[in-house]
Every structure is written in C-alpha cells, then in structure tokens.
Amino acid sequence: MLTLKPNCECCDRDLDPTGRDARICSFECTWCEACAEHLGGVCPNCGGALVARPPRDEALLESFPASTERAPAVHACP
C-alpha cells in the first residue's frame, strides 16, 4: 500500500491524498506537480521516473489513512 506522504519534498507544499497533484518515483519519493516538472520528471534521489500518484478514495482513508509524517524539503525548488 502506498504511504501517501503529505508534502512535496522540494517546496513542502501540502498534497491531498485524494487529489491528483502528487508525483512519485518507485521508492515513493513525493513531489508536487510543479516541482516534478521543474525536475524534468526525474527523481533527484534515485534517478527514477516521477509519475502521477494514484489518489485514495475518501471512504478508504478512514481505514487506511495517509501518512502524517512530513518528508524533509531538501532539494532546490523552482
């Protein structure tokens, strides 16, 4: 199951677990759409492709909540 990190690792923007604005790599590094575009669609942590993170239905968030642990913003933002 995806962790659904709550923020962008670049600009620290909040990301909605039910939305389609997050991008992830295969290691679940998490970016907002704007930062992923600025990064050329490539994860600076592992070199993997950044793809749209699937949203989790609101009804499932009760039983399977998104993470509340924020990822550190350690990369240069656009």
Image (tube, helix red, strand yellow):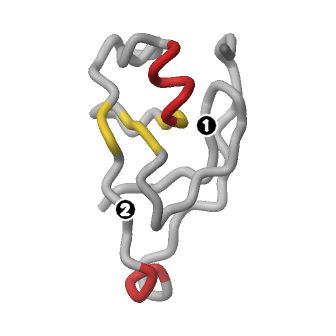
Q: Is residue 71 left or right of residue 40?
A: right
Q: Is residue 25 left or right of residue 16?
A: left
At 37% from the left and 69% from the top, the residue drawn is 56
- The N terminus lies in quadrant: bottom left
Q: Secondary structure at mark 1?
A: loop
Kind of residue at disc 2: Pro
Above-or-below relation of 59 to 72: below
**Image quadrant where residue 47 sits:** top left
Picture coordinates of residue 53, whole percent (x, y) = 35, 48
69 or 49: nearer the viewer: 49
Above-or-below relation of 60 to 54: below
At 54% from the left and 50% from the top, the residue drawn is 5
Above-or-below relation of 34 to 16: above
Q: Secondary structure at mark 2?
A: loop
**According to the image, label 2 marks what residue?**
55
Q: Is residue 16 left or right of residue 47?
A: right
Above-or-below relation of 47 to 61: above
- The C terminus lies in quadrant: top right
Q: CA distance from mark 1 to mark 2?
A: 15 Å
Picture coordinates of residue 10, whole percent (x, y) = 64, 25
| Sequence-earlier tag: 1 or 2 | 1
**Image quadrant where residue 63 sits:** bottom left
**According to the image, label 1 marks what residue?**
8
Picture disc at residue 39: none
At 54% from the left and 36% from the top, the residue drawn is 32
Q: Residues within 10 Å of mark 1 (few under 14, many from 20)?
A: many
Picture coordinates of residue 45, whole percent (x, y) = 46, 16
At 50% from the left and 74% from the top, the residue drawn is 65
Kind of residue at disc 1: Cys
